[in-house]
Amino acid sequence: MKPYQLIANWKMNPQDETATLELAQGLYALEKNIWVAPPAIFLAHLFKKIPGMILGAQNMSAQPAGPFTGELSGAMIKNSGGSFVILGHSERKQFGETDSTVCEKIQQALSLDITPIVCMGEKEYMKDTNELQWEWDKQISTLFSDISPRAKLYAVYEPAWAISTTEGTLGSAPVQHIQRFHSWFRERFSYPLLYGGSINSESLPSFQFLPLDGFLIGSASLQLAQMQKIVTIIKDF
């Protein structure tokens, strides 16, 4: 079995320190190589309580410091025990985040030796290959401009229409769709490529033969029973 990187994106969950620690300890006991992105307020607490766990943030500012109310700097993440950050998640678009801003955040993270987990993908389901590739080309021309092809980062194919918490979701992307993206991406970059979008124990088996390097897991990562099934399935890949 090849090693797969699993990253748990807890989004705005859990709601208190006790539940957060309990879930994190459960995941760490299950599989020590699961990276966890909890709400930022719990980052330092988990780092102190579970020193071996790889922790990160769900977003960060493109600015190093200054008068930016409500923002989280890369230094804050690092000083709280975070070693990676999820950037460009489709749910951030509702706050006006652009690909240009995400590119600035990638650069800021890399300058601090924080590993960026860069999400990309189309907003709406498209069947036409030319239309899809035009959309993807447009994204990468901005996202990865001025980023070294040897940079330490992970890319995530995360089409917004496939995310389980998105209104009107179509479920996880069809295997052929992900394969198409992988082929297109590999012609341009060698960054490790993950998939995110309605990942759970029911959808995961269909991805067994795809040449992916891991998965970004959302709501399913909040359920230990689901994560136990996911880890078991991946061990059989």
Image (cartoon, rainbow, N blue to C red):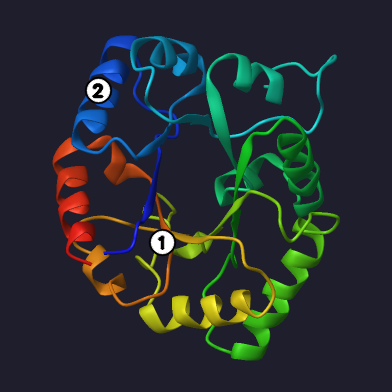
Q: Quadrant of residue 176?
A: bottom left
The answer to which of 153 and 215 lies nearer the viewer is 153
The answer to which of 51 and 212 lies nearer the viewer is 51
Which of pointers 1 and 2 indicates the residue nearer the eye? 2
Residue 213, above or below 26: below
Hey, what amino acid is under mark 1?
A: Gly
Circle 2 sits in a helix, a strand or a loop, which is it? Answer: helix
Distance CA(mark 1)–CA(mark 2):
33 Å
Image quarter hosting the N terminus = bottom left
Circle 1 sits in a helix, a strand or a loop, which is it? Answer: loop
Residue, x 61% and y 74% (percent of image)?
Answer: 185
Answer whether residue 236 is visible to the viewer in this image.
yes
Residue, x 60% and y 68% (percent of image)?
Answer: 122
Q: Residues within 10 Å of mark 2 (few under 14, many from 20)?
A: some
Q: Residues within 10 Å of mark 1 (few under 14, many from 20)?
A: few
Q: Which residue is identified by label 1?
A: 168
Q: Where does the image place residue 95, in percent across and percent down from the top left?
A: 67, 39
Q: Which mark is residue 87?
A: none
Answer whether residue 71 is visible to the viewer in this image.
no
Is 188 left, or right, of 56 in this rendering?
right
Q: Where does the image place residue 114, in percent across and percent down from the top left?
A: 64, 34
Q: Quadrant of residue 7?
A: top left
Q: Which residue is identified by label 2?
A: 25
Determine contact: label 1, label 2, CB under 8 Å.
no
Q: Where does the image place residue 78, in percent across and percent down from the top left?
A: 62, 21
Hey, what amino acid is under mark 2?
A: Gln
Residue, x 21% and y 50% (percent of image)?
Answer: 231
Residue, x 69% and y 75% (percent of image)?
Answer: 188
Q: Where does the image place residue 86, in percent across and percent down from the top left?
A: 57, 41
